[in-house]
Image: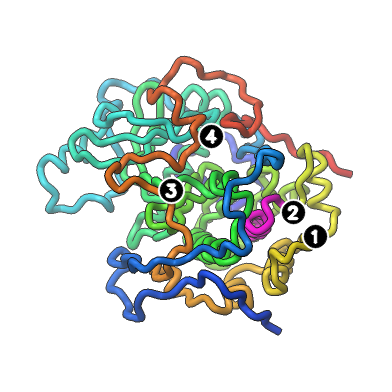
Amino acid sequence: MSRFREEGIEPEDPDTDNPNGHAQEETGATAVPATDEEPATPASETATAVTAQEDVATAPATPVAADAPRIPRSQSADRTRTALSRAFAPSSASESSRADTTGDDESASASPAARATRRKVSVADFEMLRVLGKGCAGKVLLVRHRLRGELYALKAITKRHVLAHQELQHTLTEQAVLRRMANGNADPFVVRLHWSFHDRENLFLVMDFHPGGDLATQLARWGRLGRDRARFYAAEIVEGVEGLHAAGVVYRDLKPENILIAHDGHIVLTDFGLSKEAQDDFARATGTDTTSTFCGTAEYLAPEVIQGLPYSYEVDWWSFGTMLYEMLTGITPFWADNHSDMYVRVLQDELVFPDDRAMDQDTKSMIRGLLQRNPALRIKEPRIKRHPYFSMIDWSHVYYKRYIPPYIPPIDPSNASDTQNFDDTFLDMEPVINDGAEEDETDVDASGRCLAVLSPPSIR
C-alpha cells in the first residue's frame, strides 16, 4: 500500500496508488563563475553581467528548416482516478474573495495596502494581458496586479473540468508542492507561488512570470542545443530536481514544456499537478515510499511506469536522461509515431546515439546511466553530480546562479510584458478566464491541446 499522500482535501475512498577515464571538455562558450564569495542567502545572489557566447559549432544558427518539421509532442495525462466524494461546491460570495497565500512574499511590516491585498485577493485584482498557454483544464495568462502594478502568471483551472475528470487531488497537490517548496528558503529553481484562491467557476494559482518562455519552444525554434547550453540547463535541472526530492516530492512530469526560462537565462521548474509527496520525514529521507499510478507524458515515461511496477524518485532521472538526449539531438531516444510503439521501444530497443559528434563519451556515459531500465542501476543523486559529464561544474555556483547563462532570451527592456518568447497560437487568443469554448471531453494532440486520460499500455 502506498505511503504517499496528497495534500489538501482527502477523499473518503482510498487512492488508486498501490504503492525512488574523462573525455576532454570541448572548447566553446564555457560558463564562468562570477564570484567566489558565499552570499548570506540564495535570494541575495545576482547574475554577473558578463557576456557569454553560445556554442555555435554544435547548434544550428537558425531555426529548423521547413523540411524538418517539429515532431508532435504528447501532453501530460493521468489514468482516471477513484471518484472523490468531497469536491468543490459552488463558492459563496465570501469564498470568491478569500485568498490563501504562501506567506513568503509579505512581511509583518508590509504597508496597509499590501496587507489588504493579501487578505482579499481575487481575480478582480488582476488585469488580464495575454494568454501564455492553454490546456484541457484551463489556461495560463499574463496578468498585472491592479494595485501593485506587478506582472504575474495566473494559472486558471476550471472547476468543471476538475470535477468531471476527478482531478481535484492533482490541483491540491500542485498547490501543496508549491507551498512546500516556498517554505523557509525558497528553492531557486522552482517557480514561486504568491497566492492561491478560487471563485465559483475556477481555481487560481498566481506565480512569477518568466518572460523567456519554455525549453520546448526553444527546441522547436532551434532543433537542438549546443553542448555548453545543454550542459548548463542540465546542471540547473539536476539542482532543481534534487531539491524536489529532498523535499519528498516525485515530479513525475519532467519535460521541456515544464522548464521555464527566466529573463536572465536561468531555468525554473513548473507544473506540479502530477507530482507525489512522501508521507513522512523518514520516507522522504530514505526514498522508501513507492507508488504505481500510470501518469506523465508518453515520451518521458520510465519503463517501470509503463509496466505498472512500483516506482519512486528514479522515474524523474529517466525523464531527465530522455530530455538531455533530446536537447542534444532534437528528438527523444525512443520516439515512435504512436504511444504503443513508443512504449515497446522504451522496454525493448537498444539505446542508439547519432553519428554526428553531437555527444562526447562522457555525455553518452551519462545518458546510458540515466536510461538504465533497471531503476536500481539508474544513476541518481548523489552520484549524478560526480559523473564526468559534470566534472567542470562547481555545484555551489549552480545553486547560487553564479554561472553566466550561455543564452539570454531576447526581451524588450522597455516592455516588461514582452511575450515574444511564447507561442503565437496562445498569444492570439483573447485574454479572458472563461471563453465559453471549454469542452467536457478532451482527447487531442499536442498543438495546444491535451489528452485527458492516458490509458496504461497492453504490452506482452
Q: Which mark is residue 212?
A: 3
Q: Which mark is residue 351?
A: 1
Q: Residue at x 76, y 46 (%)?
A: 335
Sort mark 3 into few (<14), some (14-19) or many (20+) by Cα contacts within 10 Å: many
Which residue, as the protein is rendered here, is positioned at the far bottom? 21
- State the SS at label 4: loop
- State the SS at label 3: loop
Q: Which mark is residue 12?
A: 4
Question: Compared with residue 118, is residue 360 higher up or lower down, i.e. above or below?
Answer: below
Question: Compared with residue 92, is residue 34 higher up or lower down, i.e. above or below?
Answer: below
Which residues make up the magenta segment? 315-333
User: Position of 444 compared to 439: left or right?
Assistant: right
Q: Residue at x 30, y 43 (%)?
A: 416
Q: Nearer the viewer, mark 2 or mark 3?
A: 3
Q: Are marks 1 and 3 in contact (CB under 8 Å)?
A: no
Q: Is residue 176 visible?
A: yes
Q: Disc 1 or 3, which lies upstream in sequence?
A: 3
Say which amino acid is labelled 4. Glu
Assign the magenta stretch its main secondary structure: helix
Residue 307 point in image, percent of width and height = 78, 48
Answer whether residue 319 is magenta in the image.
Answer: yes
Sort mark 1 into few (<14), some (14-19) or many (20+) by Cα contacts within 10 Å: few
Q: Quadrant of the C terminus?
A: top right
Say which amino acid is labelled 3. Gly
Q: Are marks 1 and 2 in contact (CB under 8 Å)?
A: yes
Q: Nearer the viewer, mark 4 or mark 3?
A: 3
Q: Disc 4 or 3, which lies upstream in sequence?
A: 4
Which residue, as the protein is rendered here, is positioned at the far right? 460
Q: Residue at x 55, y 23 (%)?
A: 164
Q: Which residue is mark 2?
A: 333
Q: CA distance from mark 1 to mark 3?
A: 32 Å
